[in-house]
Every structure is written in structure tokens, then in C-alpha cells.
């Protein structure tokens, strides 16, 4: 199944307890596409400025990533600066410079319009809606968002969500969007806004799916040294959607498998700064961690059950 993502391509400056990285390659669409490319080919729609090095785009193109939808326009590339304290589950945004994002008017190349799977990665919800309206007949539209847009463009976001099938969102942001501290209740309220299903990402505590077939939860793969959590959520979504595109079928079984693939890709991504771990990652390592993940979650029912 063909997969398209719209989102940000960024320069990230990040501080974690393991160190500092300035102006590293980041962005929601970039993390998503790199993770998805381990499972399928993926077409990216994004914008960069004149300062974005050509060889970075070429690096993405060497993977199974179509970068022909990445526009270069006058101005500076989107920049994000954040830091993590001892609680690595929560990024603290220090600076957001939208730069060329403010001029971005996304037009899907013709070759992208027949996408069967569309991922609206974290970006202005107005741009998410514009892209969605250009895809002819997608089987699944999934989306992500963050506090920046929930606070700054709430009405636009709520309008975009009406046509989204699956929202993939952090626990804190699910609570903020729904105005509800209980996650199951927050998920129900979000589902009432449009999405048939909601996946809540809970950092090191794993992910939970709330949907028409009930609830499914998976732990996060235990990683001893988290170097940089940036992009974990986007890598999760990339692994998940990439897997669905590869198997070509969306049902409760494949969605659960997809969530494990997403968790595995996120667990690799956080082992180094920016995308450094992903550049070295092999398909064999991904397969092996999927097997370890199964062992992590398999158990027999207690023998005392009647
Ligand atoms: P996450 O997977 O949630 O850790 O996403 C991290 C990525 O989101 C970083 O690479 C940032 O460049 C990007 N990002 C940060 N703020 C925004 C924003 N307001 N809109 C879109 N992308 C953002």
C-alpha cells in the first residue's frame, strides 16, 4: 500500500542528560520516513529553506524515501530547541521558529495523490487538512499533533480531526486536547471528535490503542541508556504505518503487530542523538528486536483460574 507523510523537516537543538546536540537533522516527517523506510517505500511532503544542505536530502533519498515532494523555498528551515530533564518522557520546548513553515502551501505531486495510507505528522493542522483534501481515496488517514498546536490552533485542529481515522498522540497531549485527566476518558472524548481510534503514546510506559475493537496495550521495549528521546513518537508512527503499508491489510491483528513494529523503531531511535542510530540500523536488528518483544509480552494464564 502506498504511504505518504506530510510533516516537518527541521534543525533540532537538543539537550538531554547525555549531552547537547546543536542543529541536528530532525522534524516529524523526517523521523517518520526514516523509520517507515525499514518496511516500505514512503513519499515525503515537507518544506525546507535555502539553508538546508542538499546532501541531507540525498541521504534520505538513498533510503526507500521519495523526497520529490520536499519543496525548497526562500527563507530559513524550521527550527526547534528543546530539553529533557531526568524524566525523559517529556520534552520541554525552549524555542520554536516556524520560518518557512509559515509560507508553506502544500501541493501534493500527482504521483502522491493515490496514497492508500496518509500520515499527517506533527505540523500546523491547517496544512494537515489541506493535504488530506488532496488525497483521492485513502484507506487510512492517521495524524499526530502536539501541545504547540493544541494551544495555538485548537479550533483548526478540532476541525482537521473530524476527517482523521486514527490519532496518535502523547499522553499529556491527549489529556490537554480532551480536558480530561483519565486517559481512557480522554481517548473516548477524542474519539467523539472524529477519529475512530486513538493511540496514546506513554514514553517508557508503552502505548495503548482505544478503538472499536476495544483496548490493546503494549509496553515500551526496555532501553537502559536513552540518549535522546527526540523523534520517538514519530519513529513509532513510521514503524507502525510502514508495517501496515507492507502487509497491505488493516485490521485489529495487523494494527497490534504494527504497534509492536512502531515500538521497536522508537526504541532504536532513542539510543543515540538525532537519527544517528537509524543510519546504522539493519533490518536484521529490527527483526531480532521484534522477536525479543514477543518474549517480553508472552505469558501463560495463572493456573489458579477456574
Ligand atoms: P517527537 O517524536 O514528538 O519527539 O517529535 C520530535 C520532532 O518534532 C522534532 O524533530 C522537532 O523538529 C519536531 N517538532 C517540534 N515542534 C514542532 C511543531 N510545533 N510542529 C511540528 N514539528 C515539531
Image: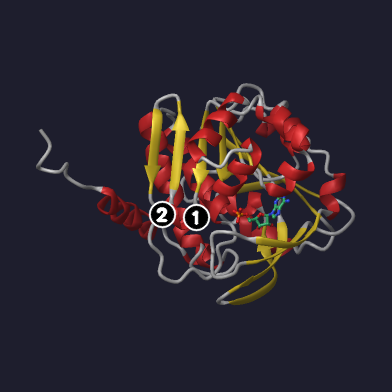
The answer to the question of whether label 2 and label 1 lie on touching residues, with beta carbons closer than 8 A, is yes
Task: Please indicate, yes or no, whether residue 108 appears anywhere in the rendered image.
Answer: no
**Left or right: 29, with 40 as reference point:** right
Q: Which one is in front, 72 or 300?
A: 300
Secondary element at tag 2: loop
Residue for badge 1: 203
> Residue lying furthest front in this view?
181
Residue for badge 2: 220
Q: Which one is in front, 283 or 243?
A: 243
Residue 75 appears in which quarter of the rendering? bottom right
Q: Where is ligand 1, by quadrant?
A: bottom right
Vertical relation: 197 (above or below) 145 = above
Vertical relation: 114 (above or below) 36 = above
Q: Residues within 10 Å of mark 2 (few under 14, many from 20)?
A: many
Q: Who's the residue at 40% across and 70% down the image?
A: 224
Q: Who's the residue at 38% across and 37% down the image?
A: 216
Q: Which one is in front, 115 or 150?
A: 150
Task: Please indicate, yes or no, whether residue 92 appears anywhere in the rendered image.
Answer: yes
Secondary element at tag 1: helix
In the rendered structure, find residue 212 and report the number of the disc placed on it.
none
Q: Who's the residue at 83% across and 39% down the image?
A: 105
Residue 4 appears in which quarter of the rendering? top right
Q: Kindly tell me whether mark 2's CB lies below 8 Å from ligand 1.
A: no
**Left or right: 55, with 208 as reference point:** right
Amino acid at each position: 500500500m502506498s504511504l505518504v507523510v506530510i510533516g516537518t523537516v527541521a534543525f533540532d537543538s537538543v539537550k538531554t542528560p547525555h549531552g547537547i546536540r546543536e542543529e541536528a537533522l530532525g522534524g516529524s516527517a523526517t523521523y517518520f520516513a526514516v523509520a517507515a523506510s525499514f518496511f516500505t517505500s514512503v513519499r515525503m511532503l515537507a518544506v525546507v529553506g535555502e539553508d538546508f544542505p542538499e546532501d541531507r536530502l540525498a541521504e534520505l533519498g538513498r533510503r526507500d524515501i521519495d523526497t520529490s515532494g520536499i519543496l525548497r523555498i526562500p527563507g530559513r528551515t524550521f527550527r526547534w530547541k528543546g530539553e529533557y530533564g531526568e524524566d525523559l518522557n517529556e520534552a520541554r520546548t525552549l524555542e520554536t521558529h516556524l520560518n518557512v513553515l509559515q509560507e508553506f502551501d502544500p501541493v501534493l505531486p500527482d504521483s502522491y495523490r493515490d496514497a492508500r495510507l496518509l500520515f499527517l505528522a506533527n505540523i500546523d493542522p491547517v496544512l494537515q487538512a489541506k493535504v488530506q483534501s488532496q488525497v483521492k481515496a485513502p484507506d487510512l488517514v492517521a495524524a499526530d499533533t502536539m501541545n504547540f498546536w493544541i494551544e495555538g490552533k485548537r479550533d483548526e485542529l478540532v476541525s482537521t480531526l473530524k476527517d482523521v481515522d486514527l490519532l496518535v498522540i502523547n499522553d499529556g497531549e491527549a489529556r490537554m486536547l480532551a480536558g480530561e485527566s483519565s486517559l481512557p476518558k480522554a481517548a473516548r472524548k477524542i474519539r467523539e471528535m472524529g477519529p475512530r481510534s486513538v493511540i496514546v503514546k506513554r514514553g517508557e510506559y508503552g502505548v495503548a490503542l482505544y478503538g472499536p475493537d476495544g483496548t490493546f496495550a503494549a509496553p515500551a521495549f526496555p532501553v537502559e541508556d536513552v540518549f535522546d528521546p527526540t523523534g520517538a513518537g514519530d519513529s513509532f508512527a513510521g514503524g507502525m504505518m510502514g508495517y501496515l503499508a507492507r502487509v497491505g491489510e488493516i485490521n485489529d491483528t495487523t494494527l497490534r503487530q504494527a504497534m509492536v513494529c512502531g515500538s521497536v523503531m522508537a526504541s532504536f531511535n532513542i539510543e543515540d542523538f538525532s537519527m544517528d542510530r537509524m543510519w546504522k540500523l539493519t533490518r536484521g536488528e529490527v527483526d531480532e528486536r521484534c522477536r525479543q518483544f514477543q518474549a517480553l509480552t508472552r505469558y501463560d494464564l495463572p493456573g489458579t483460574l477456574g
